Amino acid sequence: MTPGLGHKLKEALLAIVGPEGFSEALIDMVSYSGDASEHSHRPQAAVWPRNAQEVAAILSLANQERLPVVPRGAGTGLAGAVVPVRGGLVMDLARMNRIREISLADRLVVVEPGVVFAQLQTALAPSGFSFPPDPASGKVATLGGNVATNAGGLQGAKYGVTRDYVLGLEVALADGSLMRTGSRCMKSVSGYDLTGLMVGSEGTLGVVTEITLKVVPKPPLSATASASFGDLRQAGDAIRQIMSSRFTPSVLEILDAECIKVLNRHAGQSLPEAAAMVLAEADGYTEQETDLQIRQITQAFAENDAQNIALAQSPEEAQQFWAARKAIGGTLFSLNNTMLAEDVTVPLSKVTDMLVGIGETARRNGVLIATLGHLGDGNLHPNLIIDGRDPDQLARAHRAAAELFALAVELGGTLTGEHGIGLAKASFMPLEHDETAMRMMRQIKRTFDPHDILNPGKMGL
Ligand SMILES: Cc1cc2nc3c(=O)[nH]c(=O)nc-3n(C[C@H](O)[C@H](O)[C@H](O)COP(=O)(O)OP(=O)(O)OC[C@H]3O[C@@H](n4cnc5c(N)ncnc54)[C@H](O)[C@@H]3O)c2cc1C
């Protein structure tokens, strides 16, 4: 059992956040023990600060007391990054959920970290602007979490990831000081890029208390096409042709044979059984623009022996095409009690090799791996679905995941394109980063957080 906090420490925290901002109740500790990964560990207490000053005061106290603090958004992470492995405090930022400013003249918004991704999109919708990196968890995940994990989404190839939109931050540091990084400008080369350092740092360097995000106009029109392929290599060749053309699809997704089977059996779909189904979207400002792009894409499908090539004839039909893609995440999660949702990413020219390698890894280890992916940016999601109560299945799944990491790195790729390192991939960091890079990362961590109180035990640091 995780011990509670001492009386004096508890009183000091209560003096900062008040009784409504503090809990040691078992029910809260259980709720805060995990995220959407298989990892879990209970904290000793939870705090709900209301502003940056409270966050800073809590950190200052925790630093003196050497008490671990884990900042938490919505807990949708898939890498165990928010699991309080060394106990201590969970700092839930849900109460800091105001959109402070929307300035279309400056093309930016200023938000608190607890604002949910979808809340911002709803607020921006009337203006026709958006913050494009759209994680599938966007109805729940917070912008603080998105920044801390450098979240990405379906539109990564054309519109980039969270990092490309963060102009500036306010961050509470381990010693309780508040730091402003970046600016409200579209360009700045003033000093080291502290904003960039914070993005994707998984709560290990500071707690983000305010975010200035660039927003962009959303093209009003889109065209959607789909096709199936009898062979993964043909799908890979079609993708290579599309991505080496002069057009960038706004979305380019793949569902492999396992995903197709699962959707047909468990989600009421009737997709043609094939090695892969590819869905593409092209966006733009006129029909001529979207039409030109989507025809390039369908031509690439046809030239690489695709079957069932279809072009959505209306927005409603496009929605039907996307229904399968939208259903797959939840359907896969419901198949068994444990899913290792990986997100290896490889250079575009190596996508086919990775897809083929995933199939071989599944067969070699006797594990069901259903793969979907964002083909336009090389980010693949092999989902290892098992009964996690069976130690043999668990061991085989972990072995398969390790093999996938090794293959991705061998192909010039990375362990993670969007979910982050957290706990799940911490021990694999040296596979991707050389000794010097690891040493520099450890030194950066020590500079920001000399007593290792901020989300300790993560990222292999
Ligand atoms: C069904 C499902 C689909 C998903 N789809 C995607 C996807 O398409 N793309 C994608 O990128 N991810 C996806 N994810 C993963 C996850 O949703 C993202 O990583 C998301 O950005 C996490 O946001 P959160 O608010 O839930 O953060 P949490 O899980 O609460 O925290 C994640 C990390 O951020 C840190 N953190 C949170 N807030 C702060 C803060 N204010 N300051 C400093 N550190 C902080 C935490 O300490 C932790 O290290 C998916 C997850 C699920 C369950």
Image: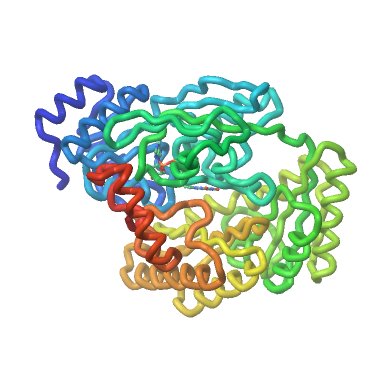
Q: Is residue 28 above or below residue 340?
A: above
Kindly tell me whether residue 193 is visible in this rendering: yes
> Residue farthest to the bottom?
364
Give how far across and how far down residue 380 sits, in percent.
Answer: 57, 60
Please tell me which residue is depicted at 36% across the width and 42% down the height of the picture. Answer: 205
Give how far across and how far down residue 143 sits, in percent.
Answer: 49, 35
**Quadrant holding ligand 1?**
top left
Please tell me which residue is depicted at 55% across the width and 68% down the height of the picture. Answer: 412
Depth order, front residue of 449/389: 449
Give how far across and how far down residue 287 sits, in percent.
Answer: 87, 40
Give how far across and how far down residue 256 sits, in percent.
Answer: 62, 65
Depth order, front residue of 200/445: 445
The reply, left or right, for residue 68 in relation to residue 111 is left
Kindly tell me whether residue 262 is visible in this rendering: no
The reply, left or right, for residue 406 in relation to residue 92 is right
Depth order, front residue of 454/228: 454
- Image quarter where the C terminus lies is bottom left
Colour setup of the view: rainbow
Quadrant in the rendering for residue 447: top left
Number of numbered tags placed on the structure image: 0
Please tell me which residue is depicted at 28% across the width and 30% down the height of the picture. Answer: 176
> Residue farthest to the right?
288
Q: Is residue 318 above or below residue 412?
A: above
Depth order, front residue of 389/347: 347
Q: Is residue 441 above or below residue 209?
A: below
The reply, left or right, for residue 168 in relation to residue 28 is right
Please tell me which residue is depicted at 80% across the width and 70% down the height of the picture. Answer: 304
Quadrant in the rendering for residue 73: top left
